[in-house]
Structures are given as structure tokens and as C-alpha cells.
Amino acid sequence: MENKKFTFILIVVSFMLLFSGVYIVASSEEPIKIGFSSPLSPPGDYESGMINLRTANLAIEELNSKGGVLGREVNLVIGDDEGKPAVGVSIAKKLITEDKVSAIVGIWHGSVAVAQAKVANDYKVPIMAHYSWPDEFTSNHWEYVFRVSPFNSQIAELIIPFIEKKGYKYIVVMAEDSDYGIGFADSFVKLASDQGIKATKDVFPSDAIDFTPQLLKIKSKEPKPDLIIVSTVYRAGYLIPKQAYEQGLTPETEIMAGWDYPGWSPSWWPTVGEAGVGIMYPTFYCSRLEMLEKGKHFQQMYEEKFSQEPPIYAYFLYDEIMILADAMERAGSSDPQKIADALKSTKYEGTTGIITFERREGPGPVWNQWMGHQLFIIQYTKEGQSQTEANIVYP
């Protein structure tokens, strides 16, 4: 009798929770585990890593508030790769072999992501890049490696029409010595040269902080370059524009930050100051980008929780976690191999577009790759400007 009474009470409570808009995950099955690897401490780009973690937690909370996936709770298993490939490899192996995750997200630094992709593919567990740019990440055409992010040669190709429109004759790409930095520089130099535009690369250690010798060397060139593209992340991205300004190289030679941190990083203006005026940067988000309903929903949710606008890569990471949930539901399983198979047929209305994973035969990085990105180039005209106040110079 007591058992029947308990069952009745449980049913009543469940219906009350359901119709009051509160959701619970009621399942005796083990939670589904999604692995997360990102730089959360120095020397890695921990500023971005923490945004990645916020975003992933927000997406997991939302999934669980709606009943989880396959009726099971979803847990995020977190690893700090410190921006180091060796650490990233260790974390990927731990997530797969010890934590038994169904997939891995949150990966960031290009060299780390490329190393982790091999591990994930060897163990047959899906890994997804939301803003890691090296072509090498997908160019091996591995079956368990997927990317929502744009990639180096794609970005270089999207920038070239702007370069031609501006009439730049000579460009120097200052690139960090990583798969991201050198990969972008090589792609851009080749594409620019194909269009008759002189372009050279100047590589520096990714942990460098004094760029004076390189900048003075660039300043002494005849003719002087019209543009410097800074292909780096984290500290160097702030210090190169600042030191170029101090050496009198700018504003005569313009600078394009090869990454969109000036648009979202709270450290940009305090670090760069007046040297940031005139700086351009490519981005996949601006006020002209038409958000889909999920994009508006995510933006509102993020802003309400963190009191700031999410950067574009947060949209992409949110999409990836929701795509994984969608793939599991379609596969009826949290088994990594079944998820990978389902991911290949994805057609998901994300935050900024309909996401599918394209696979082009023959060499190249378009393999399990989304190609629906829209590039914008932004320029700051006043110190302290926000991204929404800055000029959209292209298109």
C-alpha cells in the first residue's frame, strides 16, 4: 500500500513540475559525459578558455533543464590544457579512457587542437572545434574530427577581396610559431602572391613580449609595407599594435589583428590605449549579422547570466553542444561511434545559420567542415569604442 501511495505522489509531483515549467532529469541510467578541454591557466589563452567554459556550462545547464539527452543527465568533464600540446594530449586521453566521454568540445589553441584531433580519432571519439583555425585539423579527413569553426586558408581567401579593394601593394604577416599563426601566414602569402600582391611572413615565438627589433626592421623596409597582419593570440596580439605605435610605424603602416579579440576582450583598450585607434580586425560577428532564433535566445541567456555580450566563438561552441545532443537523439545512443555517424548527416538550425558538415573528396581541409560563415572587417576610429560602435569597413 505504501508503495502505491509513493508512486501516486511521485506522479503528481512530476506533473506539477512539468506544468510549472520546471524540468527534472529522472533516469536510473548513468549520465552522459561530454569532455571539455580548453586553456584555463597561463601560459594558455585563459581569457578565452574561461569564456569557453562559461558557454559550455550554460549549454549543459539548458539541456538538463529540459530533461537532458535521451532522458539522461548530461555532465561536463573539464580539463585545463594550459595551451600546451603535450598537456592537451594527456587530457584528451584521460577524458576518453578514464572518464569515458561521448565527445570532446572546447578545444582552442591550434597546435593543441591538431594534436588532440589525432588522439580522438585514434580512439574513435568525436572531437569538435568551434574556433580552432589550422587547416591541418580537418585535412587528414579523419572520421571523428568535426569543425564548426572557420579555418586558416578559408579566412585568408575571404580577406583577399578586401585587400584588393583597399589597393594594398605590400603586406607583412607577423605570425606566431604555431599551427594557427604559420598556417594563416602561409595561406595568405600564397593567395596574395597569386593576385599579384607582395606579401611576406615574419615568424616570432608565441611567448614573445618584445617585438621592437622586428618592428624596427619592418619600419626600415623600402618601400614600407602598407599593412601588417598580426596572426597571433593572447599577449602578442595586444603588444604588437602598442609597440608598433610607440616605434612610429603606425598609423602610416596600418595594422589588422588576425583574430577578433579587439571586439570582445576586456583587456584590449586598457592594454593598447590610443594605439588601438585605426586597428582593423576580421570577425564573423557584427551588427549586420542576422541572428536566427537560437542566436537571439543564446545571446539573451548569456547576457542575463554574465552581463556582457558573447563573442562569436561562444555562439559556435553553444551550437556544437546542441548539435551533439541532436546527434545523440537521432542515433538513439551516446556511443561515440554512433554519434560520429549521426554527425555526418547533421542539418541543424544553429545560432547564425543552418549547420551541415561538408566533405569534399581530394586533398584539403573541407572534411566534416561547416562552410556557412560570414566574414566582416571592423575598424576602430576612437579610443574606447565598442565593437558595435566601430566602423564596418568590409563588406
Image: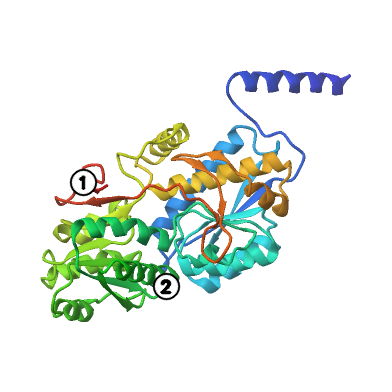
- Residue 390, label in figure: 1
Where's residue 26, x and y in %?
71, 33
Which quarter of the picture shows residue 100? bottom right
Find residue 178 and name its label: 2
| Residue type indicated by callout 1 | Ala
Residue at 44 percent of width and 44 percent of height? 315
Q: Residues within 10 Å of mark 1 (few under 14, many from 20)?
A: some
* Distance from the alpha carbon under mark 1 to that under mark 2: 30 Å
In the rendered view, would you say 139 is above or below 219?
above
Q: Is residue 213 left or right of residue 13?
A: left
Depth check: 151 or 32 in front? 151
Which residue lies at the image location 67% right of the left edge and 55% below the top edge? Answer: 101
**Colour pattern:** rainbow
Helix, strand or loop at label 2? It is loop
Confirm whether residue 57 shows in the render. no
Report whether 386 appears left or right of 28.
left
- Front one among 104 and 121: 121
The reply, left or right, for residue 349 in relation to residue 207 is right
Q: Is residue 161 visible?
A: yes
User: In the image, residue 329 lies at what x, y percent?
Assistant: 68, 39
Q: Could you say which is closer to the camera, residue 40 or residue 382?
A: 382
